[in-house]
Amino acid sequence: MTYELHYWPTIQGRGEFIRLALEAAGASYIDIARGREDADQGVPALLRLLHDSATAQPPFAPPLLKDGSVVVGQTATILQYLAPTLKLVARSEQARTWTQQIQLTIADMVTEAHDTHHPVAAGLHYEEQKPEALRRAGEFCRHRIPKFLHWFENVLNRNPAGQRHLVGGRLSYVDLSLFQLVEGLRYAFPRATEDSLAKAPLVVQLHDRVAELPRVAAYLRSERRLPFNEQGIFRRYPELESL
Amino acid sequence: MTYELHYWPTIQGRGEFIRLALEAAGASYIDIARGREDADQGVPALLRLLHDSATAQPPFAPPLLKDGSVVVGQTATILQYLAPTLKLVARSEQARTWTQQIQLTIADMVTEAHDTHHPVAAGLHYEEQKPEALRRAGEFCRHRIPKFLHWFENVLNRNPAGQRHLVGGRLSYVDLSLFQLVEGLRYAFPRATEDSLAKAPLVVQLHDRVAELPRVAAYLRSERRLPFNEQGIFRRYPELESL
């Protein structure tokens, strides 16, 4: 079965958390919106799925995962849906609950990272909310990056199965998502992130191990991995880190 | 088994989504932080659980649910954990995935509602971010309330099992959460909310039916239901709706 990922074609964004899970598991998938329109792909195919008036389960926003006739939205829900099949989560219900709890905390930080450059409205340009962004980004760098990264370090430190993974003794989807979160924070706020990572060595080690997983490493070298840019969630606006 | 809910004792906040599920199901629970300190409850008990250095699964923030030795954080994860036992979710995996997708969209709107009065930082007072709040609240009222409520209406409208519930033919935890979301929006932004609800009759009907469920109605009349106030997520600052 080939999965269809429907996400904006020019950014990593929230879709990247899904791409990483699919890539790390070696799953077969099509990144639909990056395909050719004359092959029924591209952004029009994404918009058709998003606005499909015949579906009983209308999605709110990308990313969307299509698995046969099933369409799933919300990044954390997609990961939870995929993980058992991709073998990216433990078997026990309690471990799965803990994994999802961590994923939702990652999702909270992703939203806060986005809002550093869009503190007023996602529908306005960054340039229309720059004074507000300066304040929010300053608070994010001073208080939120340290707090979240300290928590992830703590989770790794206390894992009874060892400090190499967030949950249990093997790779799960939250390890991949934490890798991506660190990548994004380093891109957007390099100084503040390194300051906090200096006190979170287990997070850095996890990040580095994920980057070296053969399938992930191959993906990161490929053209399938989009570079960070200033249309995504993690954006480098140097003025936002100058406070 | 008596559940322990650990949440701030003076606000509805995110804890209210858990309280409503427990109340609607008639579950036995203690709202720990509202109990007496000399009975090992109160805010100190909440803080002990939050900062317990012995736990292998450190929580990030309240609400927390304690079920025997299991502690679960993140509102949507707590609901997902409770729902099968409380019979507040369908049995099929696909319905459960769809239910969680809806809950995470509700959670997104809750975060946006919070950020109308805290667009710069949760760690600062509202009075320290009022100009930013005026802009964010204006955008929220003009664009986000209509968009989200239209989506919930659409979900109800397309439910193949009927328009009385968000998922399937019986009550699930997302129905309770949507009730609470409507309550909060009406409190914080009465005019903008009524404008959008005028085009979302199924949402209004669902809200009203939930309010009349015998256990929910008894809860809403009781002292266990805290009133809305200006320390919670949904706050009435008239100036934020004057744009």
Image: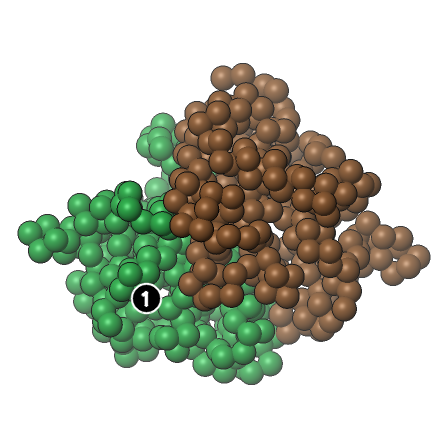
Chain colours: A brown, B green
Quadrant in which residue A229 is drawn: top right
Percent position of residue A144, x then y: 44, 33
Residue type at tag 1: Leu
- Image quadrant where one finds the N terminus of chain B: bottom left
B100 horizontally vs B48: left or right: right
Asked whether residue A53 appears in the rendered view, the answer is: no
Percent position of residue A65, x then y: 68, 61
A57 horizontally vs B206: left or right: right
Percent position of residue A56, x then y: 64, 74
Residue B79 lies, with reference to residue B33, above or below; the image says below
Report the front residue among A136 and A125: A136
Report the residue at 29% width, 61% height from top: B69
Residue B107 lies, with reference to residue B98, above or below; the image says above
Q: Which residue is mark 1?
A: B20
Report the residue at 61% width, 61% height from top: A87
Q: Secondary structure at mark 1?
A: helix
> How many numbered tags mark residues here?
1
B162 horizontally vs B223: left or right: right
Quadrant in which residue A237 is drawn: top right
Could you classify mark 1 by the number of other residues whose Cα lies within 10 Å: few (under 14), some (14-19), or many (20 or more)? many
Q: Please, which residue is most extreme toward the top here?
A: A242
Q: Please, which residue is most extreme toward the right here?
A: A38
Report the front residue among B162 and A159: A159
Report the residue at 31% width, 75% height from top: B25
Asked whether residue A163 appears in the rendered view, the answer is: yes
